[in-house]
Amino acid sequence: MSIDKFSVANLFEKSKMGFYSVAVGFGVIPYFASVTVGQFIGQRMIEEFGRSKLKENLKIFLDESLLVIAFMTPLISMLTISLAEPLITIFLPKYVESLRYIDKLSIAYYFLSLGAMLGTFLIAVNQQGKILVLNLIFIPFILLLNFAVFKNGFDLLGIAYVTFVNFFLRTFILFVLSYVNYSKIFPSVISFVKFSLPSLPILMVFALKFVRVDAYLRFYLRILIAFVWFGVSIYYLSRKTQIVSSMMSIVKEKAWVYLEKARDIF
């Protein structure tokens, strides 16, 4: 993330840094949700591996946390894209150009979100050296691509596509490095393809900008798609994972406790 900002600041006009920073500010929002999940699940994985020394016991944590991130990150991305257009247009009209990059960065940060969880897993099983080597390889790779983008006159849109390529490839490699602990390379690649599919709703939402409809109608259509995806996500995750079921049970218990307290007061 910092390498891209470094490239924009040093290769392009200073005004471009403002456009890119606003786009990153909106696009990166879903990533923080995945970091929160990663911190919670990562601690559980470290504790379990420290207790049992068995990587097999961590697979359910890895599978389910990736599923949660894969379904919930697009929801946040879709809501972000929906709100970005009216918010920037009204409050930051000088940065309307940023809207050209937010959608691309949102898909890029979807893969970064998956990569964050995969990195947490590798740290939990004492394979953090792989992350270090991977980052050392990708830093010059990103710098070279960004320089090529600048030299060929692709402007910030090229930087956004480089960001996507960077996060996609890095997450793909992290995925394979993580899942080879449990299966062969080819099944790991197939699993990565499946985990890539939930990014399609983000593509659908930002593709609406190419449809000639009223801005208000476009906003409501995006919100509608986001809430449909939310319903699908909750239904699927509650059936396929224990994490969401446990979280919903905790929420119900807490809600019932507060309801009882409120009833006693009145």
Image: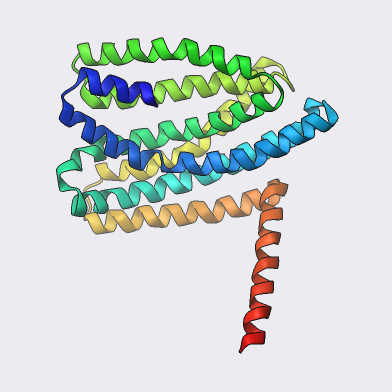
Comparing 42 with 156, the one in front is 42
Tell me: 45 left or right of 140: right
Percent coordinates x, y for residue 53 in the rendering: 82, 26
Q: Quadrant of residue 1?
A: top left
Determine the residue positioned at 71% across, 60% down: 249
> Can residue 189 be seen from the camera position used here?
no
Determine the residue positioned at 46% across, 57% down: 227
Determine the residue positioned at 63% across, 19% down: 128
Percent coordinates x, y for residue 247 in the rendering: 67, 55
Placement of the C terminus among the 4 image quadrants: bottom right
State the residue lying farthest toward the bottom.
266
> Can residue 191 be seen from the camera position used here?
yes
Percent coordinates x, y for residue 8 in the rendering: 26, 23
Tell me: residue 89, above or below residue 47.
below
Percent coordinates x, y for residue 211 in the rendering: 25, 46
Determine the residue positioned at 48% across, 41% down: 32
Count of all numbered marks drawn on residues in the image: 0
- Colour scheme shown: rainbow
Tell me: residue 182, above or below residue 67.
above
Comparing 35 with 231, the one in front is 35
Q: Quadrant of residue 142?
A: top left
State the residue lying farthest toward the right.
52
Comparing 251 with 183, the one in front is 251
Tell me: residue 137, above or below residue 257.
above
